[in-house]
Amino acid sequence: MSITTSGAGVIPVVKWEKPGDEQMFWQLDRMHFPNQLSMMEHDFIRTFYSQGFSVAAEGYGAPIRPHVRRFLTRHYLAFAPLPLSETELEDVGKRFEQNLGKAIPEQGKRWEQEFLPEIRALIGDWEAFDLAGASDAQLLAHWDVTIQRLARLSHIHFQIALPMLLSIGLFDEIYTDLFGAESSLESMRLLQGMPTMTTRMGQELWRLSRIASNSPTVRTILEEQAAADVVPALERDPACASFLAEFHEFLSQYGHRAETWGISYPSWVEDPSPAIKSLKDFLSQQSRDLAAELQELAEERDRLIAGARERLVGYPAQAREQFEFILAGASVAYYLSEEHGFWIDSYGIDCVRQVILEVGRRLAARGALETGDDIFHLTFAEARDTYTHPGTDRRGLIAERKAELAAYRELQVPPVLGTEPPGPPPDNPLFRTLGKFFGAPPPASDEPGVLRGAAGSAGQARGIARVVRSLADAQRLQPGEILVTETTAPAWTPLFASAAAVVTDTGGVLSHCAVVAREYMIPAVVGTGVATAVIPDGATIEVDGSAGVVRVVAD
Amino acid sequence: MGCSILSGSKGLQRTMRLTSEGIESIVRLGEPACHDPRSTGGKAAALSRLAEHFVVPSGFCVTSTALAGIAPPVHLPNWLREHVLEAYRKLVATDSPVAVRSSAVDEDGASSSFAGVHETFLNVHGTGALVAAVERCLESFFSPRALSYRRERGAEYGAYEDVRMAVLVQQQIASDVSIVAFSANPVTRRRDEIVVTASWGLGESVVGGTVTPDTWIVDHSGEHLREERIGDKRRMTIASEGGSREVDVPRVLRNVPSLGWEQVGEVARLAARLEEQTGYPVDIECAYAGGRLYLLQCRPITTLM
């Protein structure tokens, strides 16, 4: 245990994990991990960042390295410069930008020809492995391979993510510079409306809802049963068999997304309730046409690009070439931000999770754990060790760790820990982009009942605020209501199709939530810091996504 | 010349003269007939001589002979109009812009600048606008300002009646980078140094000094760099509908060298060749457009003489 609390635990005292930790500047990353971390989740994050971000950063010659810690049971992230002199850092930084610049025009090709085939092959191998039928020895070997593959997926993830984020950030900067745009929302409209696995998922779900709508039996079940009871009810009625087969096909292709990033939460394949919930919502929105909506976005995008080119007539060729170069890079990057999320963060990671669950089941059967899910309270090494040493009993250790989580559950943890750096953050394109991704501290609001955040998606909406703590909790969101949440992950995407607007505590204009809200053309205010804490559930609120302002009209 | 629909007796006269004496109403830059300042004016004749050996934007000149006797309000006679349009269609393949300038013809044909006295039309698109620009250009020759300018300098240019005017129509190049170069260093007066200054966009910003341009000092071979200063280039002039406008330089280009090292060398060699050919240190204006270097003007460096 690395943590102690002072007195009654009112003010948490952090026990640093490594020497020098107190000198670093730790930021709570609620956007990716809004909840407490189990030990294995933390191990997962550590692999993801040290084997992924750090190795990719080294490959591109980045002057910074990420560090992750589990403080106060939560996920904290710090970016620290390499131990070099200021001039050396500047040189390294310049070379790093050049390296990433070279990677920008390559990213689409690398994804299609190199990364995606490799990821699909890894997924294919995982899916071909008979988890339930494997011997203990085979499963152990598969576990080791899985941990290696996780490291590889993480490496690919950041090889994509770094030039991807930089492309989008640079495009926003060049667009704003050339055309004096008021906010990043304007530049992002030139990238919108690309067909991705995410939009395909939305349209597939929409198509299923049309099939359901034309089948009285399926329709009645969807309308009358609670989300959790729908699949059993469909299974009982033979008239629903063909719909059910299509639904399972949909899940196997698009259902590997989970409530948050990481390995802790079931995907739709395990628990299809979120997908069912979306089907129910779509049934009540007969007049919509998702394909036409995407088409509209694409047409607006093409118009805006043509307009931008028109405005650049007469500019030196070098200016127009730079604009085209970065636009092309950013368009690919915008597409890749959805694609990599689908294939790595959702699909690949779900494959890892399935292996962990199988080992958990076997350990529980041996009595090493209370339940299979308890395996998440062990580290990767502990889990392997337990598996290779029959007779080990981890139930006591796990009870302790559960008690630790329980003790910290209600604790309001500080958004930052450690030592604030003396100067402002480095002013380079990647850092500026990371700021737009994670979001900046929200501007203070001195007006009562008014919250400020970043403008995430343009437009205004007024409606009932549904303050949602988890994806399961989001089942309460009714079409036309406003989703208020700490963060959203890919599994939340279909909710955007029926929400009137979305407000988050975390994230910036490039965050998942903001990107998806723009694709669904609903207003979004992101990174308010406090929306879930101060907006009462059921209150009437007004969301101005263009200005980044939320107003509580009536409690 | 079967194209003329005669509009008046003057036109008829002119046509007859042309046919009988073979005097051309239109001459192309670079052809010997265009080198004669008595026919095409000092500016066009100088450019024409340069065009023989260097890449200058192509163009043609409506000669002073063809324009003689046309009085305001100026309307080109139909026969001349047809000639101008024919030359224009040969000059520009598509609807690319041209610049229309006056080129005054004085007694000795050498140095009349008439700077700012006669009108210049930039970014002229299409046949209608071209004819209008040629006519307005010629009309500016009769403006009170031009008339008094010529009267004041009567002694310098000879009799007022002897001063005539030609009109130069030249492809207007969309300069990506505009350059002023000196074949000798005008500051240190060193004759073995070539100074190249350049900035983004059309020439106004670099010629007019509204921007801190990039500066290179190289030797006459164009191979050895003695000094390089990359300017913080904040503003640039770009072509826009019917003229030009000044805009901010995009941040991505502001502190980026406007010329590559190869290009600096090419400009330096051009300046050195011009000095060799003219026999005195020169100050040149040139531009890169679409990767090609165009010579726009060449003058002696007066401060060194």
Image (cartoon, rainbow, N blue to C red):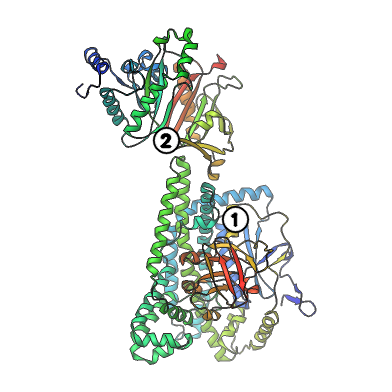
Mark 1, Cα crowd under 10 Å, few <14 / some 14-19 / many 20+, is some
Instruction: Say what amino acid the circle numbered 1 marks.
Output: Arg
Near-viewer residue (A469 or B273): A469
What x and y, as percent, mark residue A120? 42, 69
Near-viewer residue (A354 or B277): B277
Of circles 2 and 1, which is in front?
A: 2
Near-viewer residue (B248 or B157): B157
Look at the image and tell me in which quarter the N terminus of chain A lies. bottom right
Instruction: Say what amino acid the circle numbered 2 marks.
Output: Gly
Report the disc number at residue A119: none
Residue A115 in view: yes
What x and y, as percent, mark residue A172? 53, 54
Quarter of the image for residue A436 reads bottom right
- Left or right: A415 with respect to A144? right
Q: Residue at x 27, y 28 (%)?
A: B86
Q: Which SS class for mark 1?
A: helix
Cα distance between the residues tagged 2 and 1: 39 Å
What x and y, as percent, mark residue A178? 51, 47
Q: Check disc 2 and report the residue beneath it.
A: B242
Identify the residue at the far front of this view: B73
- Left or right: B31 with respect to A396? left
Q: How many marks?
A: 2
Q: Check disc 1 and report the residue beneath it.
A: A432
Residue A141 in view: no
What x and y, as percent, mark residue A339? 45, 66
Image height check: is B118 above or below B211? Answer: above
